[in-house]
Image: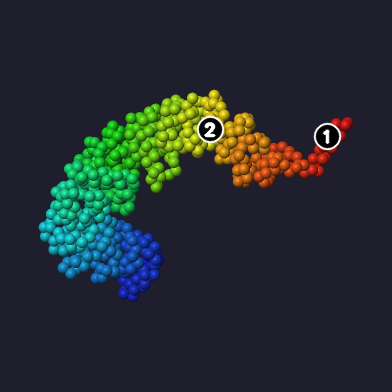
Amino acid sequence: MALPTARPLLGSCGTSALGSLLFLLFSLLSPRQLLGFTCVEVSGLSTELVQELAVALGQKNVKLSAEQLRCLAHRLSEPPEDLDALPLDLLLFLNPDAFSGPQACTHFFSRVAKANVDLLPRGAPERQRLLPAALACWGVRGSLLSEADVQALGGLACDLPGRFVAESAEVVLPRLVRCLGPLDQDQQEAVRAALQRGGPPYGPPSTWSISTLDALQSLLPVLGQPVIHSVPQGILAAWRQRSSRDPSWRQPEQTVLRPRFRRDVERTTCPPEKEVHEIDESLIFYKKRELEACVDAALLAAQMDRVNAIPFTYEQLDVLKHKLDELYPQGYPESVTRHLGHLFLKMSPEDIRKWNVTSLETLKALLKVSKGHEMSAQAPSWPVPQVATLIDRVVVGRGQLDKDTVDTLTAFCPGCLCSLSPERLSSMPPSDIGAVRPQDLDTCGPRQLDVLYPKARLAFQNMSGSEYFVKIRPFLGGAPTEDLKALSQQNVSMDLATFMKLRREAVLPLTVAEVQKLLGPHVEGLKVEEQHSPVRDWILKQRQDDLDTLGLGLQGGIPNGYLILDLSVREALSGTPCLLGPGPVLTVLALLLASTLA
C-alpha cells in the first residue's frame, strides 16, 4: 500500500495537522491498496496515526486478516471513542477490560456480536477472554439464558460451555446449528444428551420429521446411536431416499472457510465416542476426517453390502473409496466390487481395469446402480465410462462374449453392446448372435459391424428369403458390396433407413439397376436423401441417363458423353470424380483408332 511513501512524514512530531494530512492520504487510497499493509509498516506509525488508519479501513470496509487486525490492536494503546468507525473484526482483538461500565461494555459487545468470531481459533487468548466478559456485561448469572441473551452474544454463543446447553437447550441448540466448525467435546456431550432427552425445541426423537432432520443440520454429526435408533424408521428411510437421490444436498464442509476447523484437520486419531464397529446409518453424520480416522478399511470391505443403503454424500464416498484403494492397491476383489453400490460411480476406468470380474451377478448389480444414475437429471450420457470399462472386464474375465452376458447387457442397456471394442466383440460365438436385438446395434459403428456381420451371416445362413433378410438387416452396416448385390436379386425391399446405414464403400459400386432392385418400392426415398451420404456419393458415380430411368429427378450424375478418369490422388483430395468433356473423349478415341490402323 502507500504507507511507505508516508513514512518520512511521521517522525516524532505527531502534530494534529500531520494527522489530518495522513488521514486524508489514507482516505484517498483504494481498499485494495489499504489491504496490503504489513505489521512492519504499522509499527512505524504513532498511536494517533494508527487510529486514523483504522478509521479509514473501517470506512472502506476493508476485510483484513487476523494478523493485520492483531497488529492494529496491539498499536492501539487506548481504545478510540468512536467504536462504530472501526472495522468490526478489529474489536475482537481489543481487550474487553478497557470497556468498563455498563454503557461502554454493552456498546462494545453489541458491536462484537456482529463480528466474524471465527477469524480467531477457539484456543486463541483473544477469543477465550471475550465470552466471560460478554456474559458479565449482559448480567448473565449461572447457566440459564434467554433468547435475548443468546442473540446479544452473537457468534460468541458458539463457545458456550456444555452446562449452558444443558440448562438452556431450547435457545442454545438452534444457535449452535449455525456455528461453523466442530463443537468441542464438552459441547458435543451436552448436545447429545439434550437431544436424547427430547425437550424443546426439537422434541423427542420419536416424533421427529424430515424437516426436523433438516433443521438440525450441523448437529447431526454428534447424534449417538440411541438418538438415531429412536427416530421413526419411516422418517429416516424417507430422509435417506431424498438425500440418496442427490447426495450433494448436504455440503456443510464445502460452503464456508472455517478457521476453527484447521486445528482439527491434523488430528488423525479417532475420538473414543466415534469408534466404528459396524457400517450403519450413523456414519452419514460423520465428518470426512472422522470417517478417515474411525472407519477400518477391512471392516468396510467386509460390510460393503450395507453401503448402498446409506445416503452418504459425495465427499464421504470419496473417503470410503480412498480406504478401499489403500487396502487393495492392485484392484478390488469381486466380493467387494459386487457390493459397491453408488460407490461404483466414483470409480475411474483406470480403477476398474484392475478388476477381475467373472460373475454376471456382479455385472447386474453394478448395471442396476448405473441405470438408476441414468434416470437422474444430472447424469451424463449413457452408458457412463465406468460401465463401458466394466463390460470390457467382464468379457475378459469370462473369456468370451457369450449369450448369458449378451442377455444381461441387453436387459439393462441396449447401447452397452456397442461400447465394446471390435476385439471383444470378436469373442462372441456365431451361435450366440441371435441374442442380439436390432435396438442393441443402434449405436454401433462400422468397425463393430464389420466384426458382427460375418458372424450373423454364418449364424443365419440356413435361412432363406424374407426370414433371412429380417435377421440379417440390423447387421448390414458391415456387409460388403458382393453381399448387397446378392440381396438385390432376392426382392428384399430394403427400407431406406437401413440403406443409409450401409457402408459407403459397399454402396458406391452398385449400379442403378441393382439399387432399384435392392430398395424395391422404397427407391423413391432416394430423392429425399440425395444430399446425404451414401446416396450423394453414389449419385456422383452413376451416369445421369441411368439415374433418369428412375424418374425421381436425381441430379449430379456423370453427363452423357463424359468420360470418368480414375485419378486417385486428385479424386482423394477433391472428393469428386474428374470428368473429361466430349472433346478429350474424341481425341482419345482418335488416338486409339490410329493405333489400331497402324
Q: Mark 2: few, some, or many residues within 10 Å (few <14, many ≥20)?
A: few
Q: Which residue is mark 1?
A: 592
Distance from label 2 to label 1 (Cα)?
Answer: 50 Å
Q: Could you say which disc has been placed on residue 470 in the image?
A: 2
Identify which residue is drawn at 35% across, 60% down: 38
Q: Could you say which disc has been placed on residue 491 in the image?
A: none
Q: Earlier in the sequence, mark 2 or mark 1?
A: 2
Q: Quadrant of residue 58?
A: bottom left
Q: Is residue 487 left or right of residue 543?
A: left
Q: Position of residue 425 (x, y in %)?
A: 49, 30
As drawn, the residue found furthest toward the right would be 598
Q: Is residue 383 left or right of residue 64?
A: right
Question: Could you tell me which quadrant the C terminus lies in?
Answer: top right
Q: Is residue 69 above or below residue 275?
A: below
SS at circle 2: helix
308 or 291, nearer to the observer = 308
Identify which residue is drawn at 20% across, 57% down: 157
Mark 2 vs 1: CB contact within 8 A: no
17 or 193, nearer to the observer = 193
Identify which residue is drawn at 55% across, 31% down: 466
Q: Amino acid at mark 2?
A: Val
Q: Amino acid at mark 1?
A: Leu
Tally the numbered discs. 2
Q: Position of residue 463 (x, y in %)?
A: 54, 26
